[in-house]
């Protein structure tokens, strides 16, 4: 049982670190990220919506914040649900934009988030938001 707990925490921290690093990389090379977005939206047919295109430049910042939540064990359940929703959308968008390898990578990340969410019982002492106060779940 202890191995599963350690494996859960190791996976959560590594997954969070990947999100933080990838978000940081995209922020550092923000102009290249925006150029890639233009290419993706140029190829997209179904998801070529102005609302989505307006929010897409915020993705690296979202990845950074969600990754930090995972690393610091803050709102882990809500962060994982957010990751599942975002990465499912990213997968569908990238399939629409004919970037199948990137879609597969996002699908794998979505799967990792699902496994972490399903095995949330191993996340003891995580900080969660309950009404107006922070509380440690035991």
Image: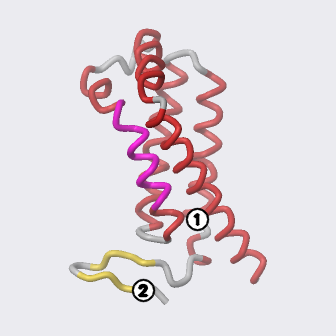
Instruction: Indicate left or right for 113 with 40 as reference.
Output: right
Instruction: Indicate left or right for 52 with 90 as reference.
Output: left
Q: Where's residue 85, x and y in %?
A: 44, 46
Residue position for label 2: 136
Residue stretch in magenta:
57-68
Depicted 65 relative to depicted 88: above or below: below
Residue position for label 1: 118
Mostly what secondary structure, the magenta segment? Answer: helix
Q: Where's residue 15, x and y in %?
A: 61, 55
What element does badge 2 sit on? strand
Instruction: Indicate left or right for 6 with 77 as reference.
Output: right
Task: Pick the quarter of the image with the N terminus.
Answer: bottom right
Q: Residue at x 41, y 62 (%)?
A: 78
Nearer the N terminus, badge 1 or badge 2?
Answer: 1
Q: Residue at x 58, y 65 (%)?
A: 118
Depicted 53 relative to depicted 39: above or below: below
- State the residue lying farthest toward the front: 28
Q: Which mark is residue 56?
A: none
């Amino acid at each position: 049982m202890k191995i599963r707990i350690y494996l859960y925490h190791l996976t959560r921290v590594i997954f969070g670190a990947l999100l933080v690093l990838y978000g940081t990389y995209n922020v550092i090379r923000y102009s290249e990220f925006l150029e890639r977005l233009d290419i993706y939206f140029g190829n997209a047919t179904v998801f070529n919506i102005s609302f989505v295109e307006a929010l897409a430049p915020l993705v690296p910042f979202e990845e950074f914040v969600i990754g930090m939540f995972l690393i610091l064990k803050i709102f882990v359940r809500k962060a994982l649900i957010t990751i599942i929703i975002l990465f499912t959308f990213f997968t569908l968008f990238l399939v629409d934009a004919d970037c199948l390898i990137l879609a597969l990578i996002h699908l794998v990340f979505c799967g990792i988030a699902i496994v972490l969410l399903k095995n949330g019982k191993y996340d003891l002492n995580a900080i969660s938001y309950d009404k107006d106060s922070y509380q440690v779940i035991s």
